[in-house]
Amino acid sequence: MFSFGKLLVLALMIGAVVVVGRWLRRFERLRTARTRDRAAAVRPPRAIEDMVKCRTCGVYIPTHGSEDCGRAGCPHRR
């Protein structure tokens, strides 16, 4: 039937599964945090700029450093 040895082995197996599961969750959290930190270090946050609608074609372009839209009469020439 049930012996003390079998119950002990079962308890050890359940304990091993719990420990390995915790270890895997911790590893995944560390990997996600490391990936997030690398992504933040690689891409600096972009500045938010105001946009202006081009009177010629209706395309919205940044107010500073804008280029022309390519159409004749564009007010945003360089």
Image: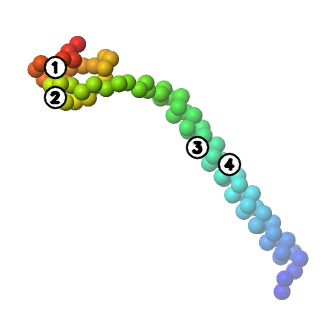
Q: Quadrant of the C terminus?
A: top left
Q: Nearer the viewer, mark 4 or mark 2?
A: 2
Name which residue lies at 47% across and 27% down. Answer: 45
Q: Position of residue 75 (x, y in %)?
A: 18, 17
N-terminal label among 1 and 2: 2
Q: Which element is circle 1 on?
A: loop
Q: How far apart are the alpha carbons under marks 1 and 3? A: 47 Å
Q: Earlier in the sequence, mark 4 or mark 3?
A: 4
Q: Residue furthest bottom?
A: 1
- Earlier-in-chain disc, 2 versus 3: 3
Q: Is residue 7 above or below residue 59?
A: below
- Do callouts 1 and 2 mark residues in contact (Cβ within 8 Å)? yes
Determine the CA span between mark 4 and mark 3.
10 Å
Residue 15 left/right relative to 73: right
Residue under pointer 3: 32
The residue indicated by pointer 1 is: 74
Image vertical order of residue 23 relative to residue 49, above or below: below
Which quadrant holds residue 8? bottom right
Amino acid type of the residue tagged 2 in the rendering? Cys
User: Which residue is tagged 4?
Assistant: 26
